[in-house]
Image (cartoon, helix red, strand yellow):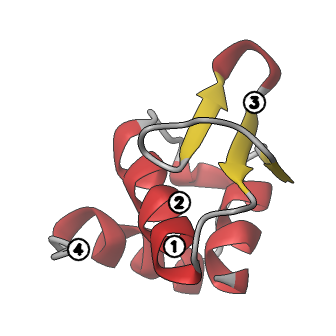
Amino acid sequence: MEKLESLLKDLGYRVRYEKGNFKTGACVLQSNRVVVVNRFSNLEMKIGALVSILRDIPLDGGTLDEKQRQFLRSIKQTKLAI
């Protein structure tokens, strides 16, 4: 989970854990580049929500190092079974 948070941070997003009623376990505030994750979700749901967000938001991987770009590619290519 720390790797996902670090990747989002390096892409310019802040990750916050707050209480909320999110159907997917998280939401993205695009204008503020903030990802809000439901802190009451279990670990599996939190990871799934972060992966889903990384897949859906438009990302510029130019600021990432090679290791992070490979990690992002693997996230975008892997299908989660939750």
**Left or right: where 34 falls relative to 70:** right
**If you read the primary sequence from the N terminus, does the residue marked by circle 4 or circle 1 appear first?**
1
Relative image position of residue 21 (x, y in whole percent)? 60, 35
Label 3 neighbour load within 10 Å: few <14, some 14-19, many 20+ = some
Say which residue label 4 marks: 82
Relative image position of residue 53 (x, y in whole percent)? 46, 47
Q: Nearer the viewer, mark 4 or mark 1?
A: 4
Q: Dot 4: what SS?
A: loop
Question: Are the two marked residues, 1 and 2, in contact with CB atoms closer than 8 angstroms?
Answer: yes
**If you read the primary sequence from the N terminus, does the residue marked by circle 3 or circle 1 appear first?**
3
Q: Nearer the viewer, mark 4 or mark 2?
A: 4
Q: CA distance from mark 1 to mark 2?
A: 5 Å
The numbered mark at residue 33 is 3
Q: Amino acid at mark 2?
A: Leu
Question: Are the two marked residues, 4 and 3, in contact with CB atoms closer than 8 angstroms?
Answer: no
Considering every residue shown, the one lying at the far top of the view is 31
Q: Amino acid at mark 4?
A: Ile
**If you read the primary sequence from the N terminus, does the residue marked by circle 2 or circle 3 appear first?**
3
Q: Amino acid at mark 3?
A: Arg
Q: Residue at x 73, y 83 (%)?
A: 2
Q: Dot 3: what SS?
A: loop
Q: CA distance from mark 4 to mark 2?
A: 13 Å
Say which residue label 1 marks: 47
**If you read the primary sequence from the N terminus, does the residue marked by circle 4 or circle 2 appear first?**
2
Q: CA distance from mark 2 to mark 3?
A: 14 Å
Question: Are the two marked residues, 3 and 1, in contact with CB atoms closer than 8 angstroms?
Answer: no
Q: Dot 2: what SS?
A: helix
Say which residue label 2 marks: 50
Q: Residue at x 73, y 42 (%)?
A: 36
Label 1 neighbour load within 10 Å: few <14, some 14-19, many 20+ = some
